[in-house]
Image: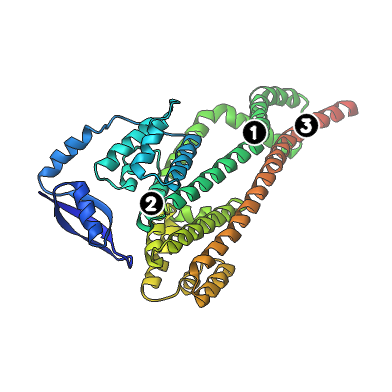
């Protein structure tokens, strides 16, 4: 018998830690559940932990393939359908593992099944599968395990992955033509500044005429780029590396995550995505018996944006002190008034889960509308930018040529 350190939550959502004596990790999970606790993590303490790690290594620590978005969606959707059909988690993973078609999903399912058989929670097993499952995915699965609503959580994750995949396809489709135009414009500008403009400046210089200011600026830019191109590339590289280093600091990360939400066009999309995702997740958790405070804590852990995580932590603290959810969100000050109005009605009627679901559907519609606006605006904006860029260069060259020709005619 060995000692296991655990972190678990009770029915009210309070997280507790401690140690428990058990014959195995799976036995420790069983004992904790018999005590009315939902295990969040269980690890063996003491000298036998090393032996356990060596034993678990035999389950397979070979590098696993990283699933792409389509494969991840396929795995999540099939697992949700099998669980809804009544299969246990291990049995559902076995079905996926034994599929006839070969893909990266099968070794993932085999690793997960082995970890679940060893007594790991499903969310902990997901974290052991490399970078395929991001922290948001793992934390939402943990929420599903706590609430007993794992199939519903997986279905919601399928909808989210489908939405993200559709967004990426639409954005790529809308940006493909502008990207070709923009790349062609960059090549054309390089040819202009490197070959044509220097020859044009020599030709125009022989006339002895004072060129228009826009032409003189173009010639100066061409000479500077031709002489200091290496310094320009070095400066851009240093600037990018410095920006990445600054964003990785706590203060820089907080500023960047906050600024992303304020970007024109993109910021409202990110906000609507966060509102819809948070509300739908909370609705699923609360409707399946999870305490609101515990649901907020799980959503906080699943949020990757540092700024939004801090807001949820403040909200969770206020709810823990006895405030209603609508009051806490109103004090935080970031959330839209319409959300507080919907939640206030739900709290007054005693049906907060339905209010959360209504709010989630509202922001789902808002997200769809904003994505449509984003993909509609990007293409003409890039084309307009390229046209403006090329037009200025063409005008400056033509203006210089016309000035020189007019001076020759006057002679």
- Which residue is under mark 1? 176
Q: Earlier in the sequence, mark 3 or mark 2?
A: 2
- Which residue is under mark 3? 400
Quadrant in which the C terminus appears: top right
Question: What is the crowding at mark 1: few (fewer than 14 residues within 10 Å), some, or many (at least 20)?
Answer: few
For residue 218, which numbered disc appears in the image? none
Of tags 1 and 3, the one toward the viewer is 1
**SS at circle 1:** helix
Q: Position of residue 106 (x, y in %)?
A: 39, 31
Instruction: Give whichever of 326, 230 is nearer the camera.
Output: 326
* Residue that appears at 38% across and 48% down: 138
Q: Quadrant of residue 219?
A: top right
Does 234 sit left or right of 402 as displayed?
left
Of tags 3 and 2, the one toward the viewer is 2
**SS at circle 2:** helix
* Image vertical order of residue 166 relative to residue 311, above or below: above
Distance between the alpha carbons at the discs numbered 1 and 2: 35 Å
């Amino acid at each position: 018998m060995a000692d296991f350190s655990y972190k678990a939550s009770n029915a009210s959502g309070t997280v507790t830690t401690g140690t428990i004596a058990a014959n195995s990790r799976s036995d420790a999970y069983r004992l904790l559940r018999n005590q009315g606790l939902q295990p969040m993590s269980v690890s063996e303490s003491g000298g036998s932990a090393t032996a356990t790690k060596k034993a678990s290594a035999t389950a397979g620590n070979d590098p696993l393939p990283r699933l792409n978005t389509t494969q991840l969606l396929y795995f999540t959707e099939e697992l949700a359908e099998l669980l809804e059909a009544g299969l246990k988690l291990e049995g559902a993973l076995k079905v996926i593992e034994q599929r006839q078609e070969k893909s990266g999903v099968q070794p993932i399912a085999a690793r997960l099944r082995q970890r679940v058989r060893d007594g790991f929670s499903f969310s902990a097993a997901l974290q052991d599968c490399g970078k395929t499952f991001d922290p948001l995915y793992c934390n939402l699965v943990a929420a599903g395990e706590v609430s007993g609503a794992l199939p519903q959580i997986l279905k919601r994750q399928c909808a989210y992955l489908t939405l993200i995949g559709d967004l990426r396809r639409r954005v790529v489709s809308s940006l493909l033509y502008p990207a070709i135009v923009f790349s062609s414009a960059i090549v054309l500008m390089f040819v202009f500044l490197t070959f044509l403009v220097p020859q044009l400046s020599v030709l125009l210089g022989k006339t002895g005429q004072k060129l228009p200011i826009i032409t003189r600026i173009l010639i100066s830019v061409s000479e500077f780029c031709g002489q200091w191109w290496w310094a320009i590339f070095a400066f851009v590289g240093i600037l990018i590396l410095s920006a990445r280093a600054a964003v990785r600091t706590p203060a820089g990360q907080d500023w960047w995550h906050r600024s992303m939400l304020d970007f024109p066009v993109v910021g409202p999309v990110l906000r609507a995505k966060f509102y819809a995702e948070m509300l739908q997740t909370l609705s699923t958790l609360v409707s399946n018996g999870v305490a609101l405070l515990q649901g907020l804590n799980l959503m906080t852990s699943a949020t990757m944006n540092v700024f939004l995580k801090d807001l949820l932590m403040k909200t969770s603290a206020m709810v823990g002190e006895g405030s209603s959810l609508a009051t806490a969100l109103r004090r935080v000050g970031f959330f839209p008034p319409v959300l507080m109005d919907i939640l206030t009605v739900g709290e007054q009627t005693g049906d907060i889960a339905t209010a959360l679901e209504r709010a989630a559907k509202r922001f789902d519609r808002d997200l769809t509308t904003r994505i449509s606006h984003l993909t509609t605006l990007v293409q003409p904006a890039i084309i307009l930018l390229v046209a403006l860029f090329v037009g200025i260069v063409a005008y400056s060259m033509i203006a210089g040529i016309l000035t020189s020709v007019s001076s020759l005619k006057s002679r």
